[in-house]
Amino acid sequence: MTDNTGGSRDLERASPAEMNVDPGQVLRYIEALDGLHCHSVMVLRKGKVITEGWWKPYRSGYEHILYSVSKSFVSMAIGFAVQERLLSLDERLVDIFGDVFPCEPCGNMVRARIRHLLTMSLGHKGVTDLDFYQSGDWLREALFHYLETEPGTNFFYDNRCTFLSCAILQKRAGMTVHDYLRPRLFEPLGITGTSWETNSAGINAGGWGLRAKTEDLARFGLFLQQRGAWGGKQLLSGKWIDEASARHIDTRGKSVLAAEDCWRGYGYLFWRSSFPGAYRGDGALGQSVIVMPDQEMVVAITAGNGARAGLLERTWDTLCPGIDSCGRGDSGTEAEQALLDAKLASLTIPHPEGKPGLRLSALKYSGQAYRMAPNKLGITKLSVQFGDIDDITLWIGESVLRLRAGHGEWEETDTGLQPGDPSDVVLLFHKNVAGSAAWRGDEYVLKLAYTRTPYVDALRLRFDAAGVTGEYECHPVFPTRAGLVELMGRPESQSERLGETPPLTGASRRQDGFIPP
């Protein structure tokens, strides 16, 4: 296997045909992903990028929430710690956290070891009424748990396992997992601009919270495919990569999703896959880094696919048949490459259905502020200034969200919203948003793509002399997001308008808005 990277420099590019992959199959793969709420995709073979695309308004330079793909980075951090003899997988949790346990541990907890955290086989069958991240002390709550089964025998997917792994590494290394990985993994691979959510004690969440660019995810996948080698150096033992990606425990009938690709077993914070030899880091809503060692292939995907339906299946049945099946240099190949290039250039999140542009009959409502009835979004007031580019203002409690929307185009806005208390998990609004608006009859439809997240929501409004009615629809829907929220408001009176000067502060809410199941 050849390492084609050179330290932190840009990844090399090649056409699919140059890497003996059929561009027609790649085109069909991109067409399949186009209907599955994808935000980006990169395909690599033999160390070179052969296909890459972003669905506007998502861009290559934007970090994206990775959710549970974060776990696979924790796996590598533990591997580095083992390599540096900071810890051993056979160490018991009671020996590491003897001064932290909130109560006398049960017999199974006494037998629990670090390796059981990595394989999600700590020994419990379900979550407690109060999950650990909902408490004031994550560490004590994560350890305050009765284990019903012998550690290592029962798979149960639980974020506490990855959080405890982060807590252990931080205890031994004296720094967060994020800081620990920076000189060992991120900097050698040329990964920059990442961030990772921490709790109030300064420990990385572990099971979620990492934000990185799609190319960062692709570099990580290439590092895995090259068994820990990069730029001619062996950063992490190939033996650890093999061990981390191997099947250690059965997941059939026990995974978070009833899908074939979740029933092929689990490694050290990696999922085995139905395609022979393949494994992956997998996150909610379709975030994935897929490694196919035998084919020297890596696929990195970010998405907003609520059920994750079809993403892996289309990779196996549409992309993979094109491997080693390309007739190089013929006119058909060149024509298919041209079609692929055109498709990649045209990728976009669909604009709202309806007629783009200014609706003259709506001008009488332009700039009118509406006092909103109590709603789950906390919107107290809204107004829309219609024009070639619409200006939308939402008052959320005592904060103000201002954004812009194009017509048939995406208009991007930095709203200035900042993350707040990590316990606030109902946030719908985010710092970076792109808007696109259209009229569907008498209904104003505003699509909001939060470009550093998987979320692409819709706000629908209907105006008349009595006021405004409408709905805010979340996509994808999660238990911690509101789903469909009905809105209703009346025109603000002159006395109300003169008596109020709202502060222009960011909403006291967190950006991420989600604790993965």
Image (cartoon, rainbow, N blue to C red):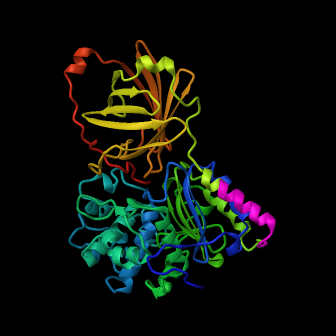
User: Which quarter shows the C terminus?
Assistant: bottom left
Q: As drawn, is 135 to the left or to the right of 258?
A: left
Q: Nearer the viewer, residue 378 or 500?
A: 500
Image position, residue 18 (x, y; %): 69, 74
Q: Which residues are magenta?
A: 327-342
Q: Residue lying farthest top?
A: 465
Image position, residue 466 (x, y; %): 40, 12
Is 203 one of the magenta-colored residues? no
Q: Nearer the viewer, residue 248 or 488?
A: 488
Name which residue lies at 32% across and 56% down: 132
Q: Look at the picture and state if 60 lies above or below 415.
A: below
Q: Image quarter for residue 408?
A: top right
Image position, residue 296 (x, y; %): 62, 77
Q: Residue lying farthest front?
A: 388
User: Which quarter shows the N terminus?
Assistant: bottom right
Q: What number of labels is visible?
A: 0
**Does residue 117 appear anywhere in the picture?**
no
**Does residue 433 appear anywhere in the picture?**
yes
Image position, residue 100 (x, y; %): 22, 68
Q: Main secondary structure of the magenta part?
A: helix
Q: Nearer the viewer, residue 6 or 318?
A: 6
Is 332 one of the magenta-colored residues? yes
Q: Nearer the viewer, residue 174 or 333?
A: 333
